[in-house]
Image (spheres, coloured by chain):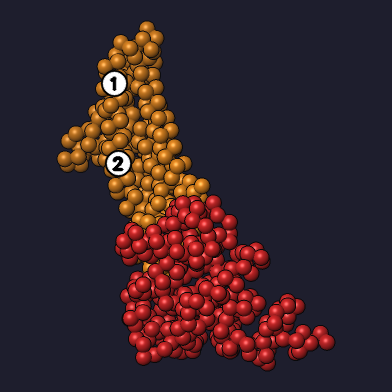
Amino acid sequence: MTAPLSHGSSIDSSAIEFDHASFRLDGRPLLQDLVLSVKQGETLVLLGRSGSGKTTTLKLINRLLLPTAGDVRVNGRRTAEWDPIRLRRGIGYVIQDGGLFPHFTVERNIALVPRIENWPQARIAARVRELLATVGLSEELASRYPSQLSGGQRQRVGVARALAADPPILILDEAFGALDPITRSEMQKEFRALQQRMRKAVIFVTHDLREALLLADRIALMEEGRLIVDLPAAEFSRSQHPLVRAYVEAFSSLPDERLPDPNFGTKRS
Amino acid sequence: MNFLQFMMANRQQVLDLTLEHMTLAGVATLLAALVGIPLGILITRVPQLSKPVLGGANIIQTIPSLALFGFLLPAPWIGDRGSRLAILALALYALLPLIRNTYAGIRSVDPAVVEAGRAMGLTDRQLLFQVELPLASGVIVAGLRIAAVLSIGLATIAAAIGAGGLGEFIFRGLAMVNNQVILAGAVPAALLALFADFVLGRLERRLGSLRSKS
């Protein structure tokens, strides 16, 4: 499968690179001096509260926004130099509740990018079947409309749609945020398994530390438009940074093998 | 002679005037749609234009209809024939609901859906024709329905400038102080309006369900 971005520069192994990137809106800094990169095959989780700049960071990748200072590079090329349409078709995008087109069937939703890329009909049909299986949906759902699906099914269709043209980069914005805890946990595990096979460059935005620890190779914590720490997931919980500690404490009542000893660093004992 | 007898006795003329009436209102609505829908789309793309365009269409609506016909009478070419003039005046009135509903319809499409489309690499044109217009079509057809009903009603006044239509019966009846004659114009005009309302209302509901198709 030829992906639109795969013929980009291969000298730089970073699929996505923020080089002192800032973004201001009406003089208000939403993102300041971000330095961050994601390699092919790597999953980076952007963790942070609402308004910390996570979504702004994502929008700089697919050029829904352009940095007001510094550079954002995708496959070694500044996003400002990319044709935005070509750039975006090489980046899968998943949002909360799927963001599906309500007037398209599941099949047409999934086939969105292949269709506008003028794939032959037979190839589109085969790809849709393949993707339904990949995200664990029965083929009977292909002719349904999004409003006839459960939240979890819609989210799966959203993931399938993002994967349709096999983009090398995948960005997910609170993708599983609208799901009930059980479905959410299922989706997280399946997504992790999927990523282990796909090896795409993934940026996953969440405010849920548990989700971050489960999915991430690296976790970047953001606050007020700044990157606070950027650590391998296994080391994140051991960081002594006060903001990391605050995060870990807020979640430390939850059981997870990567979470620290409940007595470690908490003020309760 | 009662109203029905009058209608039967003059059925050929009733039919002719009804057809004339439908033509006036139909062509005017079509013209208004051809101008109003693109204008409505334009002001979603260039928001600075939305105030002047909607304001202008609003002002047209506030002009008393008889006065608007009068204003246009001296216009060259257009003023030469009553029907052309009437169609232009009716189309001007029908503009507002079409512009406003197109604008409101597109603006009311879920921004998350539009942004998802943009982020997936849809061009502006693809976004408009594959996402925004289909999802706004119910609201746009509602505007078309209002415009059509408005035009059918206002077209009765077109007879005052010799444009024909069912208004002929109404004005004649008024002059003759004859209620049967007035009714022979008013009843078919009302039926036409109800019919347009019904047909376009059904289309509107079908298209409106695109938003949450089930």
Mark seen at residue B15: 1
Q: Which residue is mark 2?
A: B30
Chain B shade in the render: orange
Name the spot of residue A267 as percent of width and height, x first: 79, 87
**Number of numbered discs on residues:** 2
Q: CA distance from mark 1 to mark 2?
A: 22 Å
Residue A44, above or below A118: below
- Nearest the viewer among B57 and A197 is A197
Q: Which chain is red?
A: A
Q: Secondary structure at mark 1?
A: helix
> Could one spot residue A55 in this view of the protein?
no
State which quadrant residue A119 falls in. bottom left
At 57% from the left and 70% from the top, the residue drawn is: A190
For badge 1, the amino acid type reads Leu
> Could one spot residue A208 in this view of the protein?
yes
Nearest to N terminus: mark 1 or mark 2: 1
State which quadrant residue B45 falls in. bottom left
Name the spot of residue A68 as percent of width and height, x first: 42, 82
- Nearest the viewer among A117 and B147 is A117
At 43% from the left and 45% from the top, the residue drawn is: B207
At 58% from the left and 89% from the top, the residue drawn is: A231
Q: Secondary structure at mark 2?
A: helix
